[in-house]
Amino acid sequence: MTASLETRLAALEREVALQRDHIAVRQVIASYGPKVDTSDRIERARLLAELWTEDGVYDIGGVARFEGRTAIAQAFESQHFGQVPEGVCHVFGLPYVKVDGDQATALNYSVVMRPDDTRGDEGQRFFPWRVSMNRWQLVLCGDGRWRVRHRLNRLMQGHAETLAALRDIDALAAGADL
Amino acid sequence: MTASLETRLAALEREVALQRDHIAVRQVIASYGPKVDTSDRIERARLLAELWTEDGVYDIGGVARFEGRTAIAQAFESQHFGQVPEGVCHVFGLPYVKVDGDQATALNYSVVMRPDDTRGDEGQRFFPWRVSMNRWQLVLCGDGRWRVRHRLNRLMQGHAETLAALRDIDALAAGADL
Amino acid sequence: MTASLETRLAALEREVALQRDHIAVRQVIASYGPKVDTSDRIERARLLAELWTEDGVYDIGGVARFEGRTAIAQAFESQHFGQVPEGVCHVFGLPYVKVDGDQATALNYSVVMRPDDTRGDEGQRFFPWRVSMNRWQLVLCGDGRWRVRHRLNRLMQGHAETLAALRDIDALAAGADL
């Protein structure tokens, strides 16, 4: 009986750890929006870049590929810092997450919303500026936290490379639901 | 004491299985976007249709009701296949999920974004084409995977039938939080 | 050995309860959209207001601060009730959730979509009317359900107070992933 309890307990521990990883990966992704949309200067962008591993990569569609936290933080200087005081909002769609040991991959969409200043006060609206797919590759670090080692971001404009990355869903979702 | 451990272990097993189902249902829904937005031909639409049970139904607001995987795959031929190379993006809002044994219901919103080609290069924007409510009815299949047996999709234009389906939230959320 | 089983079981119970709270808080937030978008009269708005505690607060950016369920229900009378039959859709982005005992805080974005009637039938579109940050402060009530005691909603227009509230992500995400 104790053996049976031991077996069941060990199975539960594995399953609960997997479910924790599923929630944790979603948390890392969910923290990006509030962090980026308050990053109006390099000090805050450096905090944002800590979502990545030291040598992490952020490959931004239509912009450039940034490698390492310093480069990632600087990526926001030219355009994003100026958008923060105008209002800019990174809304994230539901992610598909695959956890494999201390590695994880997630696919989700992001919509960057900005106020539409072409309209009068009465007709306040926002507009979807960038609509992108994101493929997040994360790693569970020694301190127990998941960090991004590679994020591919591509505008959803039908390019072959973008669709190829998105088709990763086939392999990711081929096995069990989580 | 062993009896107590047994009781607690059994309670944990039930709870952990329920939480797994909650994550799994969200995964099925989250996999739809990347699958549909890369479905530019019937072979890929057939893979997409495998999210449904063999006799599953997809009832698309303003389009038609499709029954069975073959019909569901063909539903994308007339319009969607042509949109994929232009860029089309099914962004999903947070779902409310109710699991009841091997059945589950989920309510969420979907926003289909498309590039706005009426603007010049400088002013790249996207626009929300279809904004819909979705009621997903899923079943846990023999292979351990959740599949869709019925998906109702309706544009959020205030029609009485749409609001009636959305009011399912009252019964779904009447009991415990999950 | 039994002592070790007891220790492991207790650790699992704590972890599974935490994960349940994480899912439960997301469920409360996810139920808001279907409830509000079917609230076309005071009776339904009162059901919606039950997501809050009796003395809960809903502080709506650009509108007003409402305290208590009665006031919260009435907040929807002047404008929202009339939008429901036209179609109005509260799409929610992925929330970041921090649970601390019987208290929880969540940050997420909301996008209120409405049909764009300035376009003809052919070109049906929706538009993002309000894009907001939301800071939800919830409490686990005696009946085992999470309820909102304070929700701060602010349009993402770059105001200092809005950005300050959003920077709460720094403290929320400073510790473990969940």
Image (tube, coloured by chain):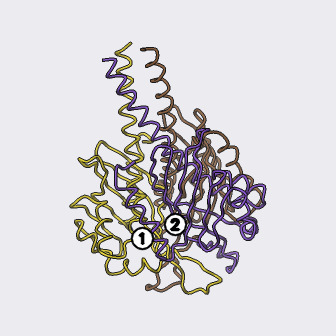
Chain colours: A brown, B purple, C yellow
Label 2 is placed on what type of residue? Met
Quadrant of res A61 = bottom right
Report which quarter residue B110 is drawn in: bottom right
SS class, disc 2: strand
Nearest the viewer among A158 and B122 is A158
| Residue at 39%, 81% in the rendered image | C82
Q: Which residue is mark 1?
A: C37
Name the residue located 60 percent from the left edge and 80 percent from the top edge.
Answer: C124
Q: Could you tell whether A3 is left or right of B86 in the image?
A: left
Task: In this rendered view, identify the residue nearer to me: B150 or B90.
Answer: B150
Name the residue tied to disc 2: B133
Check disc 1 and give the amino acid type.
Asp
- Give the residue at x 54% y 42%: A147
Residue A86 shows in the view: no
| Number of residue marks | 2
In which quadrant is the C terminus of chain A drawn? top right
Disc 2 and disc 1: Cα gap in Å? 10 Å
Give the chain of mark 2.
B
Label 1: which secondary element: loop
Q: Which mark is residue B112?
A: none
Residue B17 higher or lower than B49, as above or below = above
Which chain is indicated by disc 1?
Answer: C
Question: In x, y percent, where is residue A164?
Answer: 75, 53
- Location of residue C115 in the rendering, given as x and y in whole percent from the top left corner: 52, 79
Residue B72 visible in the picture: yes
Q: Is residue C15 above or below residue B44?
A: above
Q: Say whether marks 2 and 1 touch (CB < 8 Å).
A: yes
